[in-house]
Amino acid sequence: MPPGQLSYPPFRLGGWAATRPAEPATLDLTDPFSDMLRCVRCRGGIFLDARFTAPWCVTGQISAEDCARLARLHAPAHIIAYHYVLAGRLVATVAGEPAVEATAGDIVLLPRNDMHRLASTAGLPAAGVRDLIGPGGGRGLPRIAHGGGGAETHIICGLVALDDADHPLIATLPRLSAIDLRRARGWIEASVRYAAGELACGGEGAATIGARISELVFVEAVRRHAERTGLAGAGRRGIDDPQIIRALAAIHRSIRAPWSATSLAREAALSRSAFTDRFTTLVGTPPIRYLMLRRLQAAQQSLRDSPKSVAQIADAVGYASEEAFSRAFKREFGLAPAHWRERNTERQKPAA
């Protein structure tokens, strides 16, 4: 078998052993985030089919009772909520966090199960989700139909229950995010619609189908988040260390924040010297250099994929001035940001 290729071993999601695919899958053997995902023990469920018409606004939060009643999950150690957008758009908010917008193919992820608000637009009065839920057909999936009759938004609501309330995976995720799953939209959308249809009919095994698909959608969302933020490339042993992962998670949640070795050490609950030594040993580079590289990698992505000015990108990744950003970027990559953008944009243009 070629180096770097392994066939998947059986893995466990909620005690269920997945079958081995017929074809070998390429795995990045230096990817600690995949290791962490493979160690997650979770149980999932799809519990609500919601159709809203603008204007609309609802608030909600999943309780342990909801888990038992709607998804047949009892006494979870930790609940993660998500909403997959099948059609339309929505704005999601959590107190103390910036609002996020999601459109068809996105998943709104709430890894701490915060009380949250979903709406067609910000600033509308909200109804409580529990007051709107109607029964599904037969033993089927509960449904919501609510709103003012305008543009429709269709979402499927799900949850994932972790057996470990302190799993380091939770620390890596922001309280609220909208993650683009369009690269995998074909299988995700087909799978979610299939699970929702089976649950609506209340057929034998429907809950199990919904659970497995919910778990897979969650794992896909976490993978996309790791790719987007660069966390998937963090040092293997750093991901494994429960104190260093807190510092890594803090950096990846907010690369713009004015982090120092001292403030990152506080995140890790270590002294500055102990933190710096442990981080450098496990991740392979000192914490402040790791922060700088992460900022510059994020800047590269923005230079390549967005129309923002160099000054705007410098501010977005945490540099106090465009000049300081340009010096650091050129020192690391050999080109000024504007020249790097020009060269890399030209490479992406299709041949005439």
Image (spheres, helix red, strand yellow):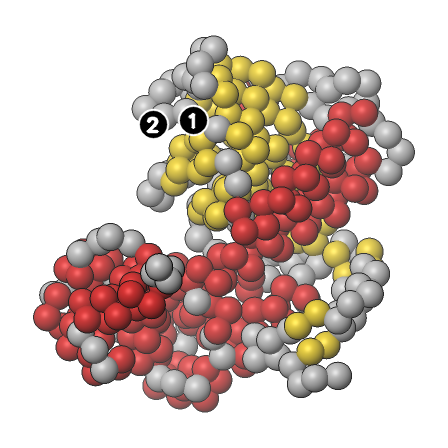
Q: In which quarter of the image is residue 71?
A: top right
Residue beneath the point at 69% across and 78% down: 5
As drawn, 321 above or below 194: below
The residue wearing badge 1 is 119
Comparing 348 with 108, the one in front is: 348
- The quadrant of the image that shows the C terminus is bottom left
Cβ atoms at labels 1 and 2 below 8 Å apart:
yes
As drawn, 104 above or below 134: below
Distance (Cα) linking label 1 and label 2: 6 Å
Comparing 227 with 282, the one in front is: 227
321 left or right, relative to 103: left
Comparing 221 with 59, the one in front is: 221
Q: Residue 66, percent across and down?
A: 67, 32
As drawn, 350 above or below 113: below
Q: What residue type is labelled 1?
A: Ala
Secondary structure state at the residue bearing disc 2: loop
- Which mark, by number, is residue 122? 2
- The quadrant of the image that shows the N terminus is bottom right
Secondary structure state at the residue bearing disc 1: strand
